[in-house]
Amino acid sequence: MMTNTPPLKEIIDEFDLGAKKSLGQHFLLDLNITHKIARLAGVEAGDLVLEIGPGPGGLTRALLAAGAEVVAVERDARCVAALETLHEFYPGKLCVIEGDALSINEPAILEQRTAKIIANLPYNISTELLIKWLKQGNMLWSRMALMFQKEVADRILAVSGTKAYGRLSIISQAASTPARAFDLPPQAFTPPPKVSSSVVLFDPPAVQPKNLDALEHITRAAFSQRRKMLRTSLKPVFGDRLEKALDAAGVRGTQRAEEISVDQFKTLAALYADKTS
Ligand code: SAH
């Protein structure tokens, strides 16, 4: 197979891919970095990868070079046209869909197959996409490798009792086992964003989680006012059953949301789901 794809810089010039701020475009043009992401995500020949926001295609090339079949969703028509140039080098291995990642139906575009989700995400929609995928779980993905602003990665990975700990930490850790792969300075991107970035790997949890909707509901109430005691913030959720639920989860009513572990929140969610079913 031919692999001498034209340099990315040429593609960017030819298709006039000046970065658009509104689309969160910060491109990765360094092959060392794109190949590192593919390697750390464990991409192998025959893997199916869902990539969001391929842009000019730096990461896409690394995924294809590793032997993956790639389904990519990109909103910018200029980039979709530029990615056409890859078809001749990887025939039948790349499918680019022009669309908004927030409104795609993942199982439909993947034809119900399980994929690895790998992306340098547009930062303004990264957490919304992550939560959407976490909730779909192991039917959709076997692993995810996603680039976030470092501050968002910190929130995903935070443990209870720390400042960064919150709803994103809890849903991420209840629905996956997240781990930081590596950090990148702003200069790794073209154009550079204002902040540092981190790649986070998500593996499926040992047991596929239940009650994620209940978990979202409870954590919303618990964290709506971080400083409130749980016996106050969770009262509207559990009503008369509050004391019992807190006891069962080993939580004191005087504690605050940020002191409660992911496992304790999972217990509360299970009790809440029982109550509403
Ligand atoms: N993966 C590329 C580009 C990352 S920048 C690289 O690493 O070089 C983020 C990309 O997401 C841009 O190409 C942008 O056009 C695209 N994008 C932004 N919003 C999107 C949306 N709602 N749906 C799909 N793609 C989107």
Image (cartoon, helix red, strand yellow):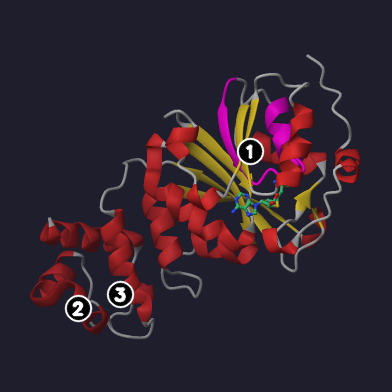
Residue 153 shows in the view: no
The residue type indicated by label 2 comes to Pro
- Which one is earlier in the sequence, the residue at label 3 or at label 1? 1
Q: Can you name the residue that lies furthest to the left here?
A: 240
Which mark sits nearer the N-terminus, 3 or 2?
Answer: 3
Q: Helix or strand or loop: what does disc 3 sit on?
A: helix
Tell me, yes or no, if residue 143 can be seen here: yes
Say left or right for 75 vs 263: right
Answer few, some or many: residues within 10 Å of disc 1's Cα (few below 14, many 20 plus, some between 14 and 19).
some
- The reply to whether dot 3 and dot 2 touch (C-beta < 8 Å) is yes
Hey, what amino acid is under mark 3?
Ala
Q: Give residue 236's mark.
A: 2
Q: Nearer the viewer, mark 1 or mark 2?
A: 2
Mark 1 → mark 2, Cα distance in angstroms: 44 Å
From the image, state whether disc 3 or disc 1 is nearer to you: 3
- Quadrant that contains the C terminus: bottom left
Tell me, yes or no, whether the highlighted magenta stretch contains residue 47: yes
- List x then y, in percent, for residue 15: 85, 43
Q: Is 267 left or right of 39, judged from the image as shown?
A: left
Residue type of the residue flagged with mark 1:
Leu
Q: Which residues are magenta?
A: 46-65
Q: Quadrant of residue 242?
A: bottom left
In this view, 259 is above or below 105: below
